[in-house]
Amino acid sequence: MKYIERIKALGQHVRVMFINPRSSATRLLTQKLGFGLLILATMITVLPILAVVIYILAKGMPAINWEFITGFPREGMREGGILPAIVGTFYLTLGTAICAVPLGIGAAIYLSEYAPENRWTRMIRIAIINLAGIPSVVYGLFGLGLFVLFLRLGTSIIAGSFTLAIMTLPVIISTAEEALRAVPQAFRVISISLGATRWQTIRRIVLPEALPGILTGVILGLERAAGETAPILFTVAAFFLPQLPRSPLDATMALPYHLFVISTQVPGMPIKIQYGTALVLLAFVLGMNLVATTIRSRARARRQW
């Protein structure tokens, strides 16, 4: 009886504590203050980005026309279009994806599903995280020494793609591994108990469920590759090349390096061409993001958890 009476007394105490008007008002005030701070942080983050995008859009739209998108540069890049830079950026991004995505996802599958949890695995993960923070100019110098000079690939699309792939691998591996680990372990246990092998479980159960997170890492890595200047400066980019590349062993123009050149190295460059190039690069990256977001949303809609 005494035990029951203590429980009742405790319940009354808890009820009074949560129904207390002063306590409720304090919680409501704290909640409103927290929401206000979150909204303020969001505005501080989003508004500057929107301002930059709107400014580039306003300054760059006068330069956007069919000739600018499909034409070749002339008159020292002060006139004409930026087609070689657009095509070169597309080839570099495609080459980076071909090299980095299979290797990155394969490494993530091994670390998540097969690698034993020991000191060496932890060291590998720490090394991958540290590699993601290395400045891009270091990767550019590495690509120059290994691919351009040692392997004698020269300044070419393939050398630039290999360099950018090495730079993006840490991001893809880290995010893909986290996405694979986020899949509930029960899915694996049930699949194996029904007779599936480990690889069949990974291929048919784990990978489809982890696809949204994997796509996030892939698009982050490729967006970084598409917007980098230092690696392509050392391995692939040409200062002025008014023609399209004919093979992976050719040098090419690229939007990030072209934007750097016309902004700092070419006197008398019309300002609208500079902002027009920046706008095209921005549209290229945002287009990649939009495609990946659409695929990721459809994958999430099919997810079973």
Image: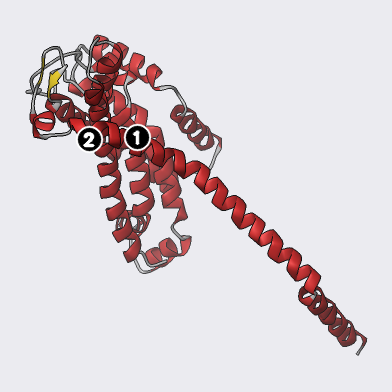
Q: Quadrant of residue 219?
A: top left
- Element assignment for label 1: helix
- Mark carried by residue 217: none
SS under mark 2: helix
Instruction: Name which residue lies at 13% across and 19% down.
Output: 79
Percent across and percent down for residue 148 are 24, 13
Identify which amino acid the numbered label 1 is placed on: Tyr
Query: Foreground: 297 or 269?
Result: 269
Which mark sits nearer the N-terminus, 1 or 2?
1
> Which residue matches tag 2?
61
Q: Residue at x 45, y 38 (%)?
A: 48
Q: Position of residue 19 (x, y in %)?
A: 77, 77
Q: Quadrant of the N terminus?
A: bottom right
Q: CA distance from mark 1 to mark 2?
A: 10 Å
Q: Position of residue 104 (x, y in %)?
A: 34, 38
Q: What kind of residue is marked 2? A: Met
Query: Toward the viewer: 290 or 109?
Result: 290
In the picture provided, is 244 more to the left or to the right than 160?
Answer: left
Q: Position of residue 151 (x, y in %)?
A: 23, 13
Residue 74 sits in quarter: top left
- Taking the image as drawn, is residue 297 in sight? yes
Crowdedness of circle 2 by 10 Å Cα count: few (<14), some, many (20+)? some
Q: Residue at (83%, 82%) from the top-left corner?
A: 12
Does any portion of residue 173 appear in the rendered image? no
Residue corresponding to mark 1: 55
* Image: 67 above or below 102: above
Image quarter (top left, top right, bottom left or bottom right) of the C terminus: bottom left
